[in-house]
Image (spheres, rainbow, N blue to C red):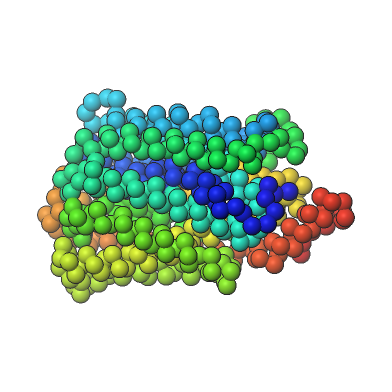
C-alpha cells in the first residue's frame, strides 16, 4: 500500500522534489562545465576527457542496479531508502569538491579524472536511486506520480540553473572567466554544500512519512540473488520498450548539454551579459514546463506526450543551427541573433523536459506490473535500471560530443570569433545529424509504451483486492 492515499500534501511535493537539487548540481557541472574545464582550462585533450567521463558513466551504470537492489532489500526502522540518503550525503559533497579542485598540480591524467568521476557518480547514485524510488511508494495515483516528478525536475533544474547563474556571474564571469581555473574551485565548493543540504534536507522532511519498517522483510542480500532479481526485473516487457526509447533520449540530452558551452561561446559568441541571461531563459522554460506537462499527460497520456515532446524539441532546437549554416541567420553576437536563439531555446528545452518527465513517470507504472507478475516490488531496481540506461546513454552522448569536437578540429585555447566557419559547420552538421536520428528513435519506442492510464488503474485496483484477500494473487490485468 502507498504511504499516501488521495491528494498529496503540498509540503510533501516540495520537500520530496528538493532532494533532486543535488542531481541538478551534478548535471550542470558534468554536462555544461566539466568538459570545457578539463579541456580548455586544465589542458586535457577533449577526446580523452570525454572518454574518461564516458568510461566513468559505464562503470557507474554497472553498479547502479546493485545499489537499487540493496535499497529494495534494506530493512530498518527508518524504512528502505532513508539510511542511504543520510549515509551518502557527506561523502558525495566531499568528492564533488575534489572533482573541481584536483589534488595534483598540472594537467590531470586520464586515470585521475576517471577515478574521481567514478566516485562522484557512485555516491550520487546512492542518494538519487533511493530518493526517486520513493515516488511509487508514496502514491499509486497515475497523475500524482507525474506531479512528484514535476517537482523533482523543477527542483533539479533550479539547482542546475542556480549553479550556471553563479558560474556566469560570480565564479567565472564572462568569456575569459570560463577559461580561468580559479573560479571552478569555488564552483565546486559551493556545489558540494548545496548537494549536502539538498539530500539531507529532503530526507529529514520526509522522515515522518517513510521512516517505518517495510511491510515485508526481504530475503538476505546475495550477489547471485541480486543479479537474478535484476535480470528478472529488466526482462519486464514494458521496461524493455522504455529502455529502447529512453536510451535515444538520454544520448540526445547528453550531447546537447555537453556541446552547449562550445556553441554559446564559438557559434553564437555570447558575451558576459548573454551568458548570464542564458540560465534565466532555461529557468523560464522549466517553469513553463511545470504547467504544461500535467495537462499533456491528462489529455494525451504519457507515451503520446513523449512522442510530441521528442519531435518538437528536435525541430525547434535544430532550426537556429540550420539557418546559421544556410546563411539566413543574423550576425552572431548581435542582439537579434541572441534574442532568436533564446526564443527557440525556451520551447525546445520545454518539450525536451516533457520527454524526460514522461519517461520517468512511466517507470512508476512498471513497478505494479512487475508486482502483479512476481508478487514483489522492486522500485529501486527499476529506477536503478533507468539510471543504468541514462548513464550509459549520457556517457555515449558526452563521448560523441568530444569526438565531434575533435573531428571538427576545434583548436585548444580558442577565443570567440576566432574559430573558422568550416570548423563550426562540421561540428554543427555532425551534431544535428545525430539529433535527428535520436529524436525519431526515442519517439518511436516511447510512443509504444504498453501501459496506459486505464490499465494502470485496473492493476492498482486488482492489487488492492489481492491485499484485502478479495481475489486470488494470480489474477492479472489483461
* Residue at far top of view: 104
Residue at 56% x, 53% y is 10
Whether 304 is drawn above or below 195: the answer is below
Residue 447: image x %, image y %? 56, 67
Q: Examine the rendering and report whether any part of residue 103 can be seen.
A: yes
Q: Residue at x 78, y 54 (%)?
A: 463
Q: Is residue 236 visible?
A: no
360 to the left or right of 366:
left
Quick check: 311 left or right of 336? right
Q: Residue at x 48, y 32 (%)?
A: 89
Total numbered labels placed on residues in the image: 0
**Relative vertical location of residue 27 with respect to residue 223 in this rendering, above or below:** below
* Residue nearest the viewer, comparing 351 with 155: 155
Q: Nearer the viewer, residue 48 or 192?
A: 192
- For the point 31% across and 54% down, which residue is it? 279
437, above or below 378, in the image: below
Q: Nearer the viewer, residue 16 or 408?
A: 16
Q: Position of residue 392 (x, y in %)?
A: 47, 46
Q: Quadrant of the C terminus?
A: bottom right
Q: Residue furthest left?
A: 418
Q: Quadrant of residue 301?
A: bottom right
The reply, left or right, for residue 10 in relation to residue 466 is: left
Residue 160 position within the rendered picture, expressed as x and y whole percent measured from the top left: 37, 48
Instruction: Say above or below: 416 vs 217.
Output: below
Image x and y of residue 244, in percent: 54, 57
Left or right: where 215 falls relative to 193: right
Q: In the figure, residue 93 lies in which quadrant?
A: top left
Amino acid at each position: 500500500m502507498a504511504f499516501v492515499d488521495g491528494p498529496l500534501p503540498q509540503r510533501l511535493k516540495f520537500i520530496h522534489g528538493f532532494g533532486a537539487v543535488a542531481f541538478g548540481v551534478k548535471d550542470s557541472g558534468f554536462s555544461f562545465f566539466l568538459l570545457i574545464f578539463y579541456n580548455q582550462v586544465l589542458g586535457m585533450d577533449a577526446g580523452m576527457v570525454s572518454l574518461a567521463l564516458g568510461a566513468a558513466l559505464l562503470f557507474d551504470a554497472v553498479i547502479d542496479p546493485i545499489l537499487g537492489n540493496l535499497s529494495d532489500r534494506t530493512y530498518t526502522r527508518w524504512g528502505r531508502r532513508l539510511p542511504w540518503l543520510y549515509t551518502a550525503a557527506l561523502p558525495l559533497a566531499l568528492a564533488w569538491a575534489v572533482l573541481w579542485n584536483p589534488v595534483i598540480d598540472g594537467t590531470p591524467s586520464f586515470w585521475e579524472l576517471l577515478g574521481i568521476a567514478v566516485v562522484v557518480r557512485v555516491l550520487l547514485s546512492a542518494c538519487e536511486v533511493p530518493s526517486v524510488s520513493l515516488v511509487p511508494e508514496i502514491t499509486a495515483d497515475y497523475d500524482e506520480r507525474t506531479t512528484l516528478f514535476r517537482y523533482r525536475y523543477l527542483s533539479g533544474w533550479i539547482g542546475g540553473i542556480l549553479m550556471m547563474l553563479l558560474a556566469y556571474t560570480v565564479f567565472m564571469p564572462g568569456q575569459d572567466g570560463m577559461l580561468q581555473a580559479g573560479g571552478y574551485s569555488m564552483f565546486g565548493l559551493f556545489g558540494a554544500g548545496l548537494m549536502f543540504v539538498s539530500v539531507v534536507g529532503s530526507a529529514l522532511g520526509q522522515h515522518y512519512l517513510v521512516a517505518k519498517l517495510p511491510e515485508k522483510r526481504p530475503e538476505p542480500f546475495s550477489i547471485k540473488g541480486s543479479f537474478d532479481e535484476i535480470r528478472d526485473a529488466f526482462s519486464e516487457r514494458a521496461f524493455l520498450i522504455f529502455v529502447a526509447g529512453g536510451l535515444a533520449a538520454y544520448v540526445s540530452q547528453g550531447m546537447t548539454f555537453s556541446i552547449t558551452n562550445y556553441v554559446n561561446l564559438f557559434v553564437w559568441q555570447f558575451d558576459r551579459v548573454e551568458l548570464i541571461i542564458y540560465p534565466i531563459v532555461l529557468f523560464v522554460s522549466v517553469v513553463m514546463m511545470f504547467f504544461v506537462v500535467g495537462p499533456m499527460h491528462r489529455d494525451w497520456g504519457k507515451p503520446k506526450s513523449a512522442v510530441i515532446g521528442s519531435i518538437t524539441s528536435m525541430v525547434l532546437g535544430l532550426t537556429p543551427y540550420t539557418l546559421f549554416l544556410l546563411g539566413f541567420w543574423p550576425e552572431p553576437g548581435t542582439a537579434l541573433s541572441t534574442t532568436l536563439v533564446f526564443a527557440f531555446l525556451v520551447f525546445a528545452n520545454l518539450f525536451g523536459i516533457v520527454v524526460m518527465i514522461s519517461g520517468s513517470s512511466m517507470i512508476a507504472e512498471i513497478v505494479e506490473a512487475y508486482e502483479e507478475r512476481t508478487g514483489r516490488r522492486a522500485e529501486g531496481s527499476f529506477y536503478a535500471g533507468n539510471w543504468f540506461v541514462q548513464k550509459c546513454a549520457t556517457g555515449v552522448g558526452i563521448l560523441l560530443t568530444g569526438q565531434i569536437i575533435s573531428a571538427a578540429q576545434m583548436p585548444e585555447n580558442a577565443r570567440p570569433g576566432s574559430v573558422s566557419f568550416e570548423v563550426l559547420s562540421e561540428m554543427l552538421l555532425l551534431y544535428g545529424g545525430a539529433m535527428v536520428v535520436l529524436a525519431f528513435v526515442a519517439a518511436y519506442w516511447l510512443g509504444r509504451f504498453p501501459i496506459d492510464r486505464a490499465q494502470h488503474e485496473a492493476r492498482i485496483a486488482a492489487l488492492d483486492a489481492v491485499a484485502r484477500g478479495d481475489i486470488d494473487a494470480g489474477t492479472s490485468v489483461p
